[in-house]
Amino acid sequence: MTQASPDKIFVNNLRVQAILGIYPIEREQVQEVVISLEIETDCSTAAASKDLADSLDYAALADAVAALTINGKYLLIETLIEDIALHCLQQPLVQGVSVQVEKPQAVARADSVGIRIYRCN
């Protein structure tokens, strides 16, 4: 059976406290960073086998993305988001990924600001 579009695994609103930004206060104090992922994959093998080894471990991926964000102490969201996408694409079974990174405290009177990208293998 051929699929019209790939299956998607998502992680919504992963919240981490990290250094992210160019302004002096952003370099000194952690701020909340909110990350969402939508990963294109094929879930049919795991569904049939009922074996996690045939699926993407989204919990491990979320932990790795959080660690990347925290440890990277990024200056720009643009660099962080590309690194997250690259990390996701290096995982087995990942065909494509949409990544969104938001900074809720960056602009007064706005819920958040951020960037969304899509990358694929």
Image (cartoon, rainbow, N blue to C red):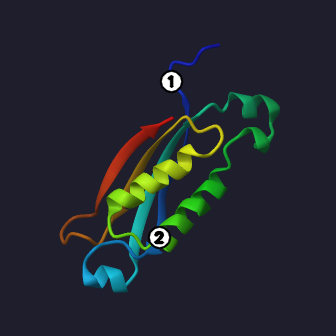
The vertical placement of 22 against 84, above or below, is: below
For residue 104, what is the image quadrant?
bottom left
* Disc 2 residue type (three-letter): Gly
| Left or right: residue 102 compared with residue 64 | left
Residue 47 x/y as whole percent: 73, 32
Residue assigned mark 2: 72
| Left or right: residue 114 compared with residue 52 | left
Mark 1 and mark 2: Cα distance apart in space: 33 Å
Name the residue located 34 percent from the left edge and 61 percent from the top edge: 77
Looking at the image, the residue that sits furthest to the top is 1
Q: Badge 2 local density, few (<14 within 10 Å), some, or many (20+)?
A: some
In the foreground, 36 or 88 = 88
Residue 112 x/y as whole percent: 28, 63
The vertical placement of 3 against 15, above or below, is: above
Residue 60 x/y as whole percent: 66, 57
Callout 1: SS = loop
In the foreground, 26 or 32 = 26
Q: Badge 1 local density, few (<14 within 10 Å), some, or many (20+)?
A: few
Question: In front: mark 1 or mark 2?
Answer: 2
The vertical placement of 94 against 27, above or below, is: above
| Left or right: residue 79 compared with residue 110 | right
Image quadrant for the N terminus?
top right
Residue assigned mark 1: 5
* Disc 1 residue type (three-letter): Ser
Callout 2: SS = helix
